[in-house]
Image (cartoon, rainbow, N blue to C red):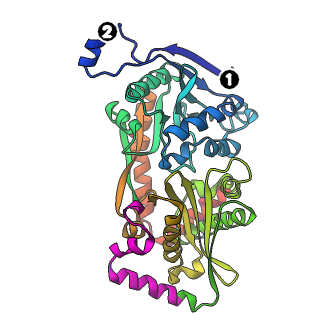
Amino acid sequence: MSAVAIRRPVHPQPAQDPEDTAAAGRPKTAACEFELITDRTAFDALEHDWNDLFERAGRGCQVFQTFNWAWHWCNHYLPARAARAAREDQRSLAVVTGRRNGRLVLVWPLVSNRVVGLRELVWMGEPVSQYGDVLMDNAPDADALLREAWSFILANLAPDLVRLRKVRDDTRIARLFAELGALATVRLEAPYLDLASAKDFTAYEQRYSPRSRRNRRRLTRRFEERGETAFEFHRGGARARDLAGLALSLKRDWLKQRGLVSPAFSDLRTDRFFADIAEGAVRPPGCEVGALTAGDEAAAIEITLHCKDAVLMHVIVFNLKFEKAGAGVLLLERSIAESFGDSCRTYDLLAPADSYKVDWADGVVGVTDWALPLSLKGRLFAQLYLGFVRPGIIAMLTAMPRSLRRFVAARYAGAAG
């Protein structure tokens, strides 16, 4: 069966007199029909309605909740039916939709997974999405509608654990999970630039100290001494695809050099995903690839996403040959300057709040990994693994000498390959 559906009112309680309802401060609500999408064909059929909902209610930071982004994710990360039947990969779609009078008003993009004997719900889009959120209309009763969608999830999926990573603090889902008593397993910050505060980059950069501006000019002169240099930016096409592939290769080199482990960048599906969204031949999600070149070599590459009035810097990496040349700083500066011509109001540097990002930023928004156990197995997993084992492993790896971390990272990459 591709989908199940039930219909129920947003507030399943006895009818009240309109004046009593208004006095209680509750908005009038309309019945909402929820549906659970578990089949790829049913997911694809949502395209038109999903796009309409995003056009009228989506925010720039919700680019990871666009249909096009989710469609590409399905192409690369959704396991085939045969793989699930063989228990090679137990992930399956669990997208919850809500309709009022036939109009799509809510999409909660989830994936169901079996891990260590428990049923877990996670965001659709992992590991390539950087923010997780529910896409929904800005209705007066939106919070009540979200709670009703949550009740639908509990009744129809009965998960042991709901683990929602990278949730911004300024979202309804963050408020809901805080109210539900979910565990905040990781707390990060995402720096951002408020480009709407200046008419152009020349005016904007006056907020930085004279010293920092001189330093960047000095880096520019030093870099230009290496020979012919150029900036290039591509929205789609073969060159964008090639640069995206090179960016991920450089990222792995950088991780290896520092002895860091990244399951996402060790997975070749990540390469294929970014190559497709960068090329943008089908259902482009707004990806742009920029590069700073020196001669015929790429010194630094970035992959950004443009959505409504926001630019989100998803990947930025430099060639290790140019590590001391400030190539990444120069590319970021040029990318920010170019964004003013795109009517961009926010340049989002995403989490974590690394020092080079904070140096540029006007502010930060909190980003939380939430875990909500709903059974004894879920509580044990959340408390023991998420609350104790995982942080301990991370702390141990961080404390290792870099040479030992490199050895561990190399062994991990070899096993993943």
Mark in the foreground, 2 or 1: 2
Q: Which residue is mark 2?
A: 16
Position of 33 with respect to 166 (left or right) is right
Q: Where's residue 408, x and y in %? A: 55, 63
Which of marks 1 and 2 precedes in the sequence? 1
How far apart marks 2 and 1 lie (CA) works out to 37 Å
Q: Is any atom of residue 59 visible in this view?
A: yes
Residue 76 to residue 332: above or below:
above
Residue 227 to residue 411: above or below:
below
Q: Which residue is mark 1?
A: 2
Q: Secondary structure at mark 1?
A: loop
Q: Estimate how packed mark 1 is, as few (under 14), some (14 to 19) or many (20 or more) residues with alpha carbons within 10 Å.
A: few
Q: Nearer the viewer, residue 1 or 115?
A: 1
Residue 291 to residue 5: above or below:
below
Which residue sits at x=68%, y=55%? Answer: 268
Residue 173 to residue 270: above or below:
above
Which residue sits at x=49%, y=49%? Answer: 60
